Amino acid sequence: MKKTLLLTSCLALTTGMAQAGDGILTVATIGEPPTLDAMQTPTDIVLTIGQHIFETLFTYDAAWRSVPLLAAAMPEVSEDGLTVRIPLREGVTFHDGSGFDSADVVASLDRWMAVNSKGKQVAEVVESLAADGPNAVVFTLKSRYSPLLATISQAAIILPSEKVADELTEFVGTGPYALKERKPDQYTQLVRFDGYQSPEGEISNYAGKREAIAREIRFVPVPDANTRVEGLISGQFDYADSLPVSAHDRVKASDTATPVIFENTGWVSMNMNMKEGLLTNKDLRHAVQLALNP
């Protein structure tokens, strides 16, 4: 099997598993994740692994619109925009065998609004979050908040209510893979969750049908980029993440790997220091904005 090289930070869910057959997919990552708790630390490495384990109410389609994942449909919004009712999918189970319902969503999002930076922003406009029967939740807002769906499409992972705690000790989700073993600085081992209930629909970015093709995914932390390159070419790894573009030609010339460059995978953000230095001057900040067109 010819392997694929990922030259920029990206997620290996679809491309990787599609070529993994029924075996084990070994992925060389940029390092050891500090945690698997995406609410606490929503960094790329945590999300890269965690997206296989956990799911959110909504996710992003190919046009980067928020669309249902664990939600059953788009929300029902009151005319004044202050009440947002979200129906939930039925028949979904967690990796521990417990059923997914509104109590899990309320407990998870309450924690998310308490510990996550974006969640804390949402909490400022939330009057209440409550279950509406077992298969729906209702946000009551203090004011209209248009980014609500986009925000809960990110690190607002849904956990079993019984597992929700200030510090997570068990990492149980509804995703296509379950955590089997984690040995820090050695590997994080995920195994296919046979009870997984996929959403319906055409695959579109993170949305649509999901299938756990590989029986197992093993994420191996390899901080040195050159070591990831050598491991990929030698066949030690099936995939390697975030390699230097300078390695492209060498990998392409090998008979074991295929380089893939993902373009437009991020954006540049210009943030001015308004607490100290020259840019405390508002007029100067305006001048910079005009000159650089951020």
Image: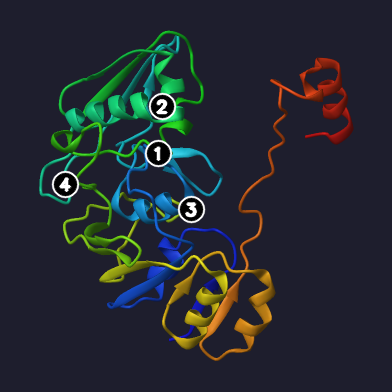
Callout 4: 10 Å neighbours few (<14), some, many (20+)? some
Disc with the residue nearer the chain's start (4 vs 1): 4
| Image position, residue 141 (x, y; %) | 39, 12
Disc 1/disc 3 C-alpha distance (Å): 17 Å
- Could you tell me if the residues under marks 4 and 3 are in contact, i.e. CB atoms within 8 Å? no
- Secondary structure beneath disc 3? loop
Disc 2/disc 1 C-alpha distance (Å): 9 Å
Q: Nearer the viewer, mark 4 or mark 1?
A: 1
- Secondary structure beneath disc 2? helix
Image label count: 4
Residue 142, compared with residue 294, is above or below; it is: above
Callout 3: 10 Å neighbours few (<14), some, many (20+)? few
- In the rendered image, is residue 257 in sight? yes
- Secondary structure beneath disc 4? loop
User: Residue beneath label 3, please?
Assistant: 205
Determine the image quadrant of residue 55. Answer: top left
User: Residue beneath label 4, please?
Assistant: 93
Give 198 or 158, whichever is nearer the viewer.
Answer: 158
Disc 4/disc 3 C-alpha distance (Å): 23 Å
- Could you tell me if the residues under marks 2 and 1 are in contact, i.e. CB atoms within 8 Å? yes
Disc with the residue nearer the chain's start (4 vs 3): 4
Q: Nearer the viewer, mark 3 or mark 2?
A: 2
Q: Residue at x 20, y 60 (%)?
A: 193
User: Residue beneath label 1, please?
Assistant: 155
